């Protein structure tokens, strides 16, 4: 709420790169291509929920680097007047007259107000004095034009101007203006972590090392992060003492006589103010690390970037950083003293800061009322095709419900959406947020600036554009998406498993339907040569195995018993042309077979049911090839050898089912046609005449033996 979760951007440079506009030409509104996208003479930028002025500062600081300098109009929309007042204060620090502060003091002043709940006394005095100056500016148009002519507050409602007046007044050191930020921070922390608060150091380490550092926050050091989570002070230097409350974090101010009621602290408490300026810099040496410890903290990176931006704002020249300026505190454990809170009521000695701001020609910053958001959503004509660049913070995504919101973009416009990448939310939440944002922008007719399907990166922002000129990238992206879809189909990714399983179950039911009661069996022309020779295609055997596994798994115990009885009664006759069931179809390879093979629980269930369909057989029974036709034995002679030479083994045959009892045949038993041994494993006898099941058991026993 008080800072963004993405790095500062030069929005004009992002616009040029998105549309590949040549910035080297000396002519405004033209490029090298002639007929392609052009740089406009006036660039309108909308910042929805920026909060900390980082994009404004960098855009103004880098303006001198562009040869074509269009007039830039930046429109700021914030959710409350207190955040707009804070935005004005941070912008005032960046554009403060060089006579008031040197470069380092200005950078440390900005860091204090930007990310610390407790500030130095000098920072507190500046906040109070500058608050009085800003109060005069918002209530007196002449004062505004003399000190900061680049500001425009004409679009603010009187209610919001009153809110600015209350915020600037509350910043003054009066006894009735109480803001106990340390208590509010602790209360919010306890409410956020609940029972984990007693073990909060472990929570802090987990959020940093297991989440933020994996998402682009490698520069954040553990000491500075833990200290910020504990106290709210993010940027620390050994020579400073933080003992004054930072009242710019106050929100929801309501006047109550001579005092104010407010909502305490309602800002973010898990990521920190390190993302805006503290993650990347132009000097790679400052990002070195050894054994997981950085040489420089995110605090040092923030200081270096602010020095660069403030130097360029003052001199309009490139910045050369002094290596001795930055202190290598990344691996140093600083001794942190307890925070001391001192309320000061004497304001007579506070220095006045009423010098004019640094002038930036061609730039105007407009502060808009939050009521313009419903107008943009409803399609008010005033905002149609208004902006060249739109930036939306991640916490303002709730306003992007209807793609018609994108009508505010010009025909050649850039839309930048901040993601939840630098939050500590779960990965699925972050991914869902990003996918919904992409879907929203694509439904609005926008095209991605980068091919997000081709690059595997973690995105703090998403950049989409509305382009009246087709530069060919869209075709390449569509082709890449088609290739990705084809590869997913080839690998079986993204298919509907439930639909596939239901289709196979229907086929199995059709195969397992009992034959007619007249014991007739449909015949089928089978190539005898193919039937009596080994199967040339082993894949079909595996397919049959997969199908039987699915059939056995989805059936119940009672259904299995009933099917066995039906097999013994109805399948007495066999095809004379071959041993395979004529009703067995040849199906395609099942893409989901691995789902059933590698599930231990399912496999145990299948094994248990297989045992119910098979039992041990004497080891003297010869092994037969299932592909070779077994010659039919005349009735009455099939057990002759067994009766003459009975085999005594531990694995004896069930007398009631084989029809043999001590060498005497039982005439009431099942006929011998149903007791064929199809498996190559001599230890199993199948009590079913279904050849597909026989084939499955043979393959299963072979795989177990291997």
Image (cartoon, helix red, strand yellow):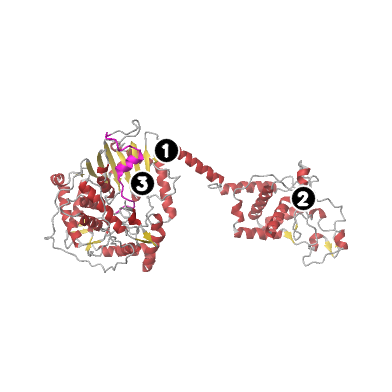
Report if the CB atoms under discs 1 and 2 are less than 8 Å apart. no
Location of mark 2 (residue) = 571
Magenta-drawn stretch contains 19: yes
- The answer to whether one can see residue 262 in this image is no
Determine whether the residue tagged by mark 1 lies in a helix, strand or loop. Answer: helix
Viewer-nearest of discs 3 and 1:
1
In the picture, the disc for residue 417 is 3
Q: Residue at x 50, y 40 (%)?
A: 482
Determine whether the residue tagged by mark 3 lies in a helix, strand or loop. Answer: strand
Cα gap from disc 2 to disc 3, whole angstroms: 68 Å
Observer-nearest of 499 and 247: 247
- Classed neighbour count for the residue bearing mark 2: other residues with Cα under 10 Å, few (<14), some (14–19), many (≥20): many
State whether residue 147 is above or below residue 226.
above
Q: Quadrant of residue 251?
A: bottom left
Location of mark 1 (residue) = 473
Q: Main secondary structure of the magenta part?
A: loop
Range of residues picked out in magenta: 3-28
Cα gap from disc 1 to disc 2, whole angstroms: 65 Å
Q: Could you say where residue 649 lies in the image, as x and y percent from the top left?
A: 79, 66
Q: Could you say where residue 497 lies in the image, as x and y percent from the top left?
A: 57, 49
């Amino acid at each position: 709420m008080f800072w963004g979760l993405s790095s500062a951007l030069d929005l004009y440079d992002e616009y040029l790169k998105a549309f590949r506009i040549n910035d080297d030409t000396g002519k405004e509104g033209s490029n090298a291509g002639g007929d392609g996208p052009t740089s406009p003479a006036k660039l309108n930028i909308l910042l929805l929920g920026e909060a900390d002025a980082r994009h404004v500062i960098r855009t103004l600081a880098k303006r001198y680097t562009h040869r074509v300098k269009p007039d830039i109009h930046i429109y700021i929309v914030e959710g409350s007047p207190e955040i707009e007042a804070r935005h004005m204060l941070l912008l005032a620090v960046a554009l403060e007259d060089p006579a008031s502060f040197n470069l380092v003091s200005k950078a440390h002043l900005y860091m204090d107000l930007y990310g610390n709940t407790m500030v130095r006394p000098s920072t507190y005095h500046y906040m109070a004095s500058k608050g009085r100056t800003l109060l005069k500016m918002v209530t007196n148009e002449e004062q505004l034009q003399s000190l900061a002519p680049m500001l425009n507050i004409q679009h603010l409602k009187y209610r919001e101007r009153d809110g600015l007046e209350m915020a600037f007044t509350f910043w003054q050191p009066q006894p009735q203006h109480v803001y106990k930020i340390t208590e509010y921070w602790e209360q919010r922390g306890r409410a956020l972590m609940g029972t984990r608060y007693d073990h909060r150091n472990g929570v802090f380490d987990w959020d940093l090392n297991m989440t933020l550092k994996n998402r682009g926050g490698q520069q954040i050091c553990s000491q500075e992060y833990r200290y910020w989570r504990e106290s709210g002070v993010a940027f620390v230097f050994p020579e400073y003492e933080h003992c004054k409350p930072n009242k710019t974090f106050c929100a929801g101010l309501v006047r109550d006589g001579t005092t104010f009621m407010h909502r305490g602290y309602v800002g973010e408490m898990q990521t920190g103010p390190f993302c805006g300026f503290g993650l990347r810099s132009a000097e790679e040496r400052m990002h070195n690390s050894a054994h997981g410890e950085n040489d420089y903290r995110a605090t040092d990176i923030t200081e270096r970037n602010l020095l660069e931006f403030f130097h360029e704002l003052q001199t309009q020249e490139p910045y050369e950083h002094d290596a001795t300026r930055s202190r290598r505190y990344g691996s140093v454990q600083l001794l942190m003293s307890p925070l001391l809170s001192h309320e000061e009521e004497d304001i007579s000695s506070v220095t006045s800061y009423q010098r004019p701001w640094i002038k930036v020609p061609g730039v105007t910053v407009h502060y808009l009322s939050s009521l313009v958001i419903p107008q943009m959503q409803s399609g008010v004509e005033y905002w149609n095709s208004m902006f060249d660049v739109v930036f939306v913070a991640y916490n303002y995504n709730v306003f992007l419900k209807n793609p018609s919101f994108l009508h505010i973009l010009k025909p050649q416009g850039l839309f930048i959406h901040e993601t939840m990448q630098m939050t500590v939310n779960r990965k699925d939440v972050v991914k869902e947020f990003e996918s919904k944002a992409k879907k929203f922008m694509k439904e609005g007719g926008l095209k991605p600036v980068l091919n997000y399907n081709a690059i595997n990166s973690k995105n703090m922002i998403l950049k989409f554009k509305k382009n009246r000129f087709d530069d060919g990238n869209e075709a390449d992206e569509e082709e890449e998406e088609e290739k990705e879809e084809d590869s997913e189909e080839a690998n079986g990714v993204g298919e509907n498993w439930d639909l596939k399983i239901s289709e196979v179950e229907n086929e199995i039911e059709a195969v397992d339907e009992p034959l007619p009661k007249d014991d007739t069996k449909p015949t089928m022309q089978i190539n005898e040569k193919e039937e009596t020779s080994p199967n040339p295609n082993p894949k079909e055997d595996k397919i049959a195995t997969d199908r039987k596994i699915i059939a056995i798994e989805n059936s119940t115990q009672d259904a299995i018993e009933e099917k066995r009885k039906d097999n013994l009664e109805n399948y007495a006759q066999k095809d004379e042309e071959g041993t395979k069931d004529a009703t067995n179809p040849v199906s395609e390879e099942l893409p989901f077979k691995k789902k059933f093979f590698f599930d231990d629980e399912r496999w145990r269930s299948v094994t248990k049911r297989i045992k119910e369909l098979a039992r041990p057989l004497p080891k003297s029974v010869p092994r037969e090839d299932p592909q070779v036709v077994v010659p039919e034995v005349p009735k009455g002679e099939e057990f002759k050898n067994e009766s003459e030479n009975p085999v005594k083994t531990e694995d004896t045959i069930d007398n009631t089912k084989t029809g043999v009892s001590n060498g005497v045949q039982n005439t009431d038993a099942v006929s011998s046609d149903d007791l064929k041994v199809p498996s190559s494993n001599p230890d199993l006898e199948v009590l079913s005449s279904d050849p597909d099941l026989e084939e499955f058991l043979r393959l299963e026993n072979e795989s177990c033996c291997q």
